[in-house]
Amino acid sequence: MEQLIDRFLRYVSVDTQSNPESESQPSAAKELDLLKMLKDELEAMGVEAELDEYGYVMATIPSNCGKDVPAVGFIAHVDTAPDASGKDIKPQIIKDYDGGDIALKGVEELYLKVEDFPEMKDYEGQTLITTDGTTLLGADDKAGVAEIMDAVQYIIEHPEFKHGKICIGFTPDEEIGRGVVKFDVEKFGADYAYTMDGGAVGELEYENFNAASASVKIQGSNLHPGYAKGKMKNAILIGMELNSLLPVEQRPEYTCGYEGFFHIIGFNGSVEEATFSYIIRDHDMDLYEKRKQTMQECVDFINRKYGEGTASVEIKHQYYNMRKMVEPHYHIIEKAVKAMEMEGIKPRIQPIRGGTDGANLSFKGLPCPNIFAGGHNFHGKLEFVPLESMIKASKVILNIISLFAE
C-alpha cells in the first residue's frame, strides 16, 4: 500500500497543468517533467520505453505466456485541468477516515462536507487523500498513472505472472481535448486498450459525449459614457445577452445521464470587445449538431439586432462518442466486468459525462473503453481519492491482463 501512495504523491508534486491557449505539442513544457520521470522509472524497472517529440511515453512488456493472444494496452494522461492550479499541491492524508466532514486546512472554513458529497460515507475506515483547498489534487489522472505503474512493477517483480504483450502509454493534453492528436496507434502496438481515467470504484464506460468548443467574440463600440446615448455598444452586456439566449435548463448544473449541455467556461473583455468561451456536449450526434447550430443562431440574432460583425463564433470539434467503435468489440467490456468481479467489485456501466483519450483512440482504430481510477470531484479544490480505490484499480489491470492471456 505504501508503494502506491508514495508513487501517487510523487507524481502529483509535479505541476503538469496543460495550456489551452498554446499551439505546441505538448501544450506546456512542464508536462514533460513527469513524462521524462515515467520513462526513466519504466527503464529502471527493465521495461523498454521511449518519449517521443510529441510528449507520448510508450512502453512494451513482451509476452511470456507462450500463446498467440491479443496485445492489450493501458493508457493514462499526465496533465491536470486548467480549471484550477496544479502547482505546489499539498495533499492531506486522512487515515482511518471517520465518515465526517474534512477540513481543507489551506483555506479557512473550507470543508469537504458529507452533506454535499454523501458518497464520502462509502469510504469510512479507509485512507483518503484530499487537497488542502488551495489547488486541485491531480488524481485526474495521476491516480491512473500510478495504478498502471504499480501494475507494471508487480509484473516485473513476479515473472511467474503469465501475460501476453502489454503496451503502456502516457499522454499529455487530454484535459484540453488534444491528448492523442498525434498518437501513433500502429507504433503503440496494442489490439485493444483501456484508459484508466474514470471516477469511483466500479465505473466502466464506453460511451462519451460528442464534444466541441465555442469561442464567441463580441465587438463593441466604446466612447465617453457622458455622450454615449444611441452610440455605445457595450460588448460585455451584448455577450451577456447572447448567453441568456441559450436554454438555462441545458446548463451542466441542471443535467445528468444522457442529457447534453452548453457550458460557459470563461469570459474576458471590456466595453470595446469581449470573448465568451463555451464547451458544447451531447451523447446523441443529431442533438450535438443541433447544439452547434443553436450557438450559431444566437450569434446571428445578435448581428441582426446590433449590426453585422458585432458577434462571431469559432466552433472547434474535440471528440466523438466512442460507442459505435467499441461496441463491435464488446468482449473487451466483458473482460473488464469480469476483472472487477474477481476483486469483489460491482461494475457500473454508464455513459461518461465528459471524454477520455479513449474516445479519439477508438476512432483511430484502437477500441479503448474507460475504467475507474478512483477519484472524486475532479478539476477543483474539493478533489479527493481513496487509496483503497487505487489499489483495486491496479488489481483490475492485472486481472484484465490475465483474462486476455487465457
Image (tube, rainbow, N blue to C red):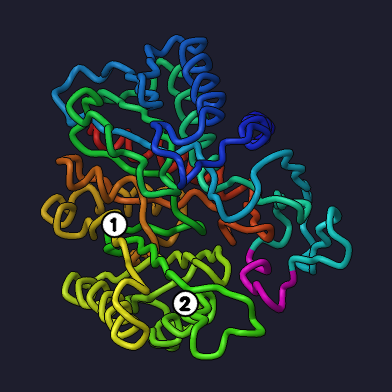
In this view, the residue in front, 156 or 55, is: 55
Residue 208 appears in view: no
Residue at far right of view: 108
State left or right for residue 123 relative to residue 70: right
User: How many C-alpha atoms fall within 10 Å of the one at disc 1: few (<14), some, or many (≥20)?
Assistant: some
Task: Please give the residue where the numbered disc 1 appears in the rendered image.
Answer: 316
Residue at the location (35% across, 68% down)? 280
Where's residue 376, x and y in %?
58, 59
In this view, the residue in front, 232 or 388, is: 232
Task: Please give the residue where the numbered disc 2 appears in the rendered image.
Answer: 239
Specify start and end residues of the magenta stretch as a single range.
Answer: 113-122
Q: For residue 190, which quarter of the picture?
A: top left
User: How many C-alpha atoms fall within 10 Å of the one at disc 2: few (<14), some, or many (≥20)?
Assistant: many
Kind of element beneath mark 1: strand
Quarter holding the C terminus is top left
Q: How many marks?
A: 2
Residue at far front of view: 227
Name the kind of residue labelled 2 in the image: Gly
Where's residue 381, x and y in %?
68, 57
Where's residue 402, x and y in %?
32, 34
Residue at the location (27% across, 33% down)? 182
Q: Is residue 115 magenta?
A: yes
Q: For residue 113, which quarter of the picture?
A: bottom right
- Residue 91 to residue 291: above or below: above
In this view, the residue in front, 130 or 253, is: 253
Name the kind of residue labelled 1 in the image: Lys
State left or right for residue 343 relative to residue 2: left
